[in-house]
Image (cartoon, rainbow, N blue to C red):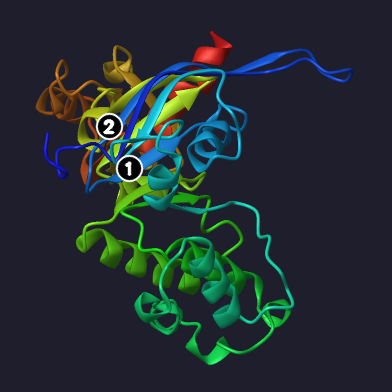
Amino acid sequence: MTQTDTPAIDITDLRKTYKASNKAPAKEALKGIDLTIPRGSIFGLLGPNGAGKSTLINILAGLVNKTSGTAKICGYDIDTQTRAARASIGIVPQEIAMDVFFSPYQALELQAGYYGVPKSERRSDEILAALGLADKRDAYVRQLSGGMKRRLLVAKALVHNPPVLILDEPTAGVDIELRRQLWDYVQELHKNGTTVILTTHYLEEAEALCDRIAIIHQGEIVANESKTDLLSRLDKRILKITPTETVTALPPELSDLSATIDGEQICIEYRSGKDSISGMLAQVKAAGLSIADLRTEEPDLEDVFMALTYASDAA
């Protein structure tokens, strides 16, 4: 297997049980996770709060000890090849925590020193400029805004040029402009070969950015497939028709359809592989209605996410 064929992340039967304490019983946070993330992808790792995402990331980062199973980063086992594994990954944590008495430049130089990056190979100024922090190079970190601190976290994760970058809720609390700047830079990193793993509660971000998505729920992977395949899981569409006439009640001719009235629109739920749009439109015309406008809505990632997590809980 060549280096490019080696997965960015390769996890087999990964388990983590937190021991019981006086305040809480034992908790099985990961229940035999199997997960392979290919090199060069933008991979979404999604799940509700408490699903096990942070535990999984912290095991890869070396911050939490696994109970059993194996995990490899770029082919390096996190237990037997720890140094190489950690050098292969950069992690942007969800929490903003850093020494406020350092300047951004000093923070990056210190981080590069931790990873043994020779001074001649350090890119601190280049990274600060790329993330829009060049003018804050020598300011105290405590003087930075929340959005700037979050960008500095990204910068720190990149000082050793890792082939894998994990972004844990990177845009939480970040305004729209900074969010766009961050994603532009992340996409540039991806074009240059960096594998990006994203956890986020902003599902529209994951849908726009990721080419493959895994959903973790109650410590188990409940989906892991391409974004296209994941979205096709729900064969449900909605036909929204705006009649020329004002409609306050559904005509009898539409009683056999899954139709409702929403304001000035008639909304008909249907399945693309089963129901005929032309047939539904014929029924609308048979009811004596003229069509001023119509459009269809397809399921998005939020619909799929809800069906795989919250809907299963309710069941």
Q: Residue 231 has which mark?
A: 2
Task: Name which residue type carries label 2.
Answer: Leu
Look at the picture and state if 269 lies above or below 115.
Answer: above
The residue under the point 35% across, 69% down is 185
Nearest the viewer among 102 and 225 is 102
Q: Can residue 256 be seen in this view?
A: yes
Q: Where is residue 261 in the image (x, y as percent from the top left)?
A: 42, 32
Element under label 1? strand
Look at the picture and state if 91 lies above or below 174.
Answer: above
Mark 1 or mark 2: which comes first in sequence? Answer: 1
The residue under the point 47% across, 61% down is 115
Q: Are marks 1 and 2 in contact (CB under 8 Å)?
A: no
Q: Name the residue under label 1.
A: 43
For the residue carrying disc 1, how many other residues have a C-alpha within 10 Å: few (<14), some (14-19), or many (20+)?
many
Task: Name which residue type carries label 1.
Answer: Phe
Q: Position of residue 92 (x, y in %)?
A: 51, 55
Mark-to-mark CA distance, 1 and 2: 15 Å
Of the two numbered discs 1 and 2 in the rendering, the one whose residue sits closer to the viewer = 1
Nearest the viewer among 171 and 253 is 171
Quadrant assignment for the N terminus = top left
Q: Residue 239 has which mark?
A: none
Q: Classify residue 7 as left or right of residue 221.
A: left
Q: Classify residue 193 as left or right of residue 206.
A: left
Element under label 2? helix
Q: Can residue 266 be seen in this view?
A: no
The residue under the point 24% across, 35% down is 289
Nearest the viewer among 143 and 285 is 143
Nearest the viewer among 190 and 311 is 190
The total number of labels drawn is 2
Look at the picture and state if 80 lies above or below 184.
Answer: above
For the residue carrying disc 2, how many other residues have a C-alpha within 10 Å: few (<14), some (14-19), or many (20+)?
some
The residue under the point 40% across, 48% down is 204
